[in-house]
Image (spheres, rainbow, N blue to C red):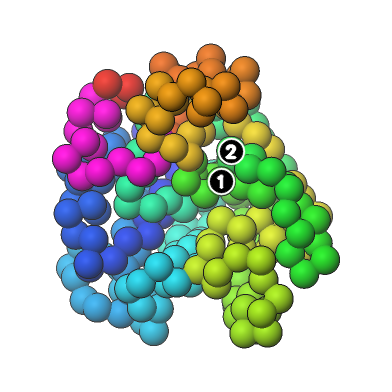
């Protein structure tokens, strides 16, 4: 049975080793995976014209990637966007998503503290841990994407953003808060760091108790190098 999840991956032709590691490991488990690159051609990547290949391209890869996936099938239950140094563990992801209703406006992820963007206070999502947008909310986001892209660009040009233009996770948080007054819901087990980082006592103490209980059954990890992808995937899948 199709898992009915749209899994987007922001990458670049310059990061081929990274996205190939994703392709050969965890993404094989998911039924609907979209690898988004910039303007340079690669048969394995969906080309997003005029987006570029550097760090700042992450914002438009996220925004136009979400738009692309929705246009491919507006009936996906959940929409997710990830970097090419992420791992998602399908079994744990599916079990968690079953707790929520795709027909309710829901934004799930690892919370990362409060931030003010252009006088809007919001609880931010840590994009490194991935996030999931329900079908209901995505249907509302879709018609606002191009409008928000212009707003984010103009705020950046006017030096009114507290983060660089390419900071996609802050952008999606701001978009959802600004237009729909919806905050991210913290999901235990969505980790924005490398699993080894939690061996450090200070990092371990900083995470929520509910996250500590999910270190052996994670939904996601971040900052995974290509040569580690298979090892970490096999350890937690």
Foreground residue among 52 and 88: 52
Tell me what residue is drawn at x 51 percent, y 33 percent: 190
Instruction: For the C terminus, give its image quadrant.
Output: top left
Tag 1's secondary structure?
Answer: loop
* Residue position marked by numbered label 1 in the rendering: 126
Residue 218 horizontal side relative to residue 186, left or right: left
Tag count: 2
Say whether residue 175 is left or right of residue 58: right
Residue segment shown in magenta: 221-234
Q: Which residue is denoted by mark 2 in the rendering?
A: 110
Is residue 112 shown to the viewer in this render? yes
**Circle 1 residues within 10 Å: few <14, some 14–19, many ≥20:** many
**Image height check: is 183 above or below 177?**
above
Q: Are marks 2 and 1 in contact (CB under 8 Å)?
A: yes
Label 2 Cα crowd, 10 Å radius (few <14 / some 14-19 / many 20+): many
Residue at screen point 54% across, 18% down: 212
Q: Is-magenta flag for residue 22?
A: no
Residue at coordinates 52% horizontally, 25% vertically from top-left? 202
């Amino acid at each position: 049975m199709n898992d009915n999840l749209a899994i987007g991956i922001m990458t670049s032709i310059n990061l081929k080793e990274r996205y190939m590691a994703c392709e050969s490991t965890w993404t094989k488990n998911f039924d609907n995976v979209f690898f988004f690159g910039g303007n340079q051609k690669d048969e394995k990547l969906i080309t997003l014209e005029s987006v570029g290949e550097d760090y700042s391209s992450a914002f438009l890869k996220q925004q136009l990637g979400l738009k692309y996936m929705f246009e491919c099938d507006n009936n996906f239950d959940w929409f997710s966007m990830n970097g090419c140094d992420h791992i998602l563990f399908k079994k744990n992801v599916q079990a968690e998503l079953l707790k929520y209703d795709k027909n309710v406006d829901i934004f799930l992820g690892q919370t990362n503290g409060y931030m003010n963007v252009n006088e809007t206070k919001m609880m931010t999502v840590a994009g490194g841990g991935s996030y999931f947008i329900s079908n209901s909310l995505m249907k509302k986001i879709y018609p606002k994407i191009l409008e928000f892209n212009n707003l984010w660009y103009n705020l950046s040009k006017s030096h009114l953003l507290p983060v660089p233009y390419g900071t996609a996770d802050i952008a999606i948080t701001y978009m959802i808060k600004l237009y729909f007054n919806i905050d991210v819901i913290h999901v235990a087990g969505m980790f924005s760091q490398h699993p080894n980082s939690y061996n450090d006592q200070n990092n371990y103490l900083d995470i929520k108790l509910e996250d500590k209980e999910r270190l052996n059954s994670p939904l996601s990890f971040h900052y995974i190098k290509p040569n580690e992808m298979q090892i970490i995937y096999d350890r937690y899948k």
